[in-house]
Amino acid sequence: QVQLVESGGGSVQAGGSLRLSCTASGRTRSWYAMAWFRQAPGLEREFVAAINWSGDKTTYADSVKGRFTITRDNAKNTVYVQMDSLKAEDTAIYYCASGGVFGMYDNWGQGTQVTVSS
């Protein structure tokens, strides 16, 4: 069992930055791969970014490429997403996810709200 706790959400004006954190506890193997997803009101949850255990493999949604950066610190059991040049359309609840295989996630956090005002 893995527990994921997100933090760092909040309100920011367009063009601003936020950094979200997600700290994991439990079976290490279950958070080999870490990812961020988001869900805006009335829309389905969508993939944002992912990173493997060693951090040498990352992938991003086209909508955030060049603006968001995912990193991890395994010594702190934490994954981050640095979000720069935020846009109003980035407003959503952001969820952290983990899994034993890159691209497959079966553990989820409770989510943290990000609101970007234009």
Image (cartoon, rainbow, N blue to C red):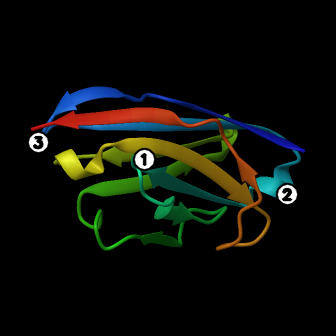
| Label 1 packing within 10 angstroms: few (<14), some (14-19), many (20+) | many
Name the secondary structure under disc 2: helix
- Disc tally is 3
Closer to us: mark 3 or mark 2? 3
Relative to 96, is 16 above or below?
above
Residue drawn at x 27%, y 26% as measured from the top left: 11
Q: Are marks 2 and 1 in contact (CB under 8 Å)?
A: no
Residue wearing tag 3:
15
Compare marks 3 and 2 and give the one earlier in the sequence: 3
Q: Pick out the residue farthest to the front.
A: 42
Q: Quadrant of the N terminus?
A: top right
Q: In which quarter of the image is the C terminus?
A: top left
How far apart marks 1 and 3 lie (CA) works out to: 16 Å
Residue drawn at x 43%, y 33% as measured from the top left: 113
Asked if residue 103 lies left or right of residue 45, the reply is: right
Estimate the x, y position of residue 36 in percent, counting from the top left.
52, 54
Q: Do the residues labelled 3 and 2 touch (CB within 8 Å)?
A: no
Instruction: Write down the quadrant of residue 100 in the picture.
Output: bottom right
| Label 3 packing within 10 angstroms: few (<14), some (14-19), many (20+) | some
Q: What residue type is labelled 1?
A: Val
Estimate the x, y position of residue 52 in percent, counting from the top left.
62, 66
How far apart marks 2 and 1 lie (CA) works out to: 21 Å
Residue drawn at x 41%, y 29% as measured from the top left: 9
Residue 66 seen in this snapshot: yes
Residue wearing tag 1:
81
Closer to us: mark 1 or mark 3? 3
Residue wearing tag 2:
29
Say which mark, if any, is on residue 96: none
How far apart marks 3 and 2 lie (CA) works out to: 37 Å
Asked if residue 50 lies left or right of residue 67, the reply is: right
Estimate the x, y position of residue 47 in percent, counting from the top left.
49, 64
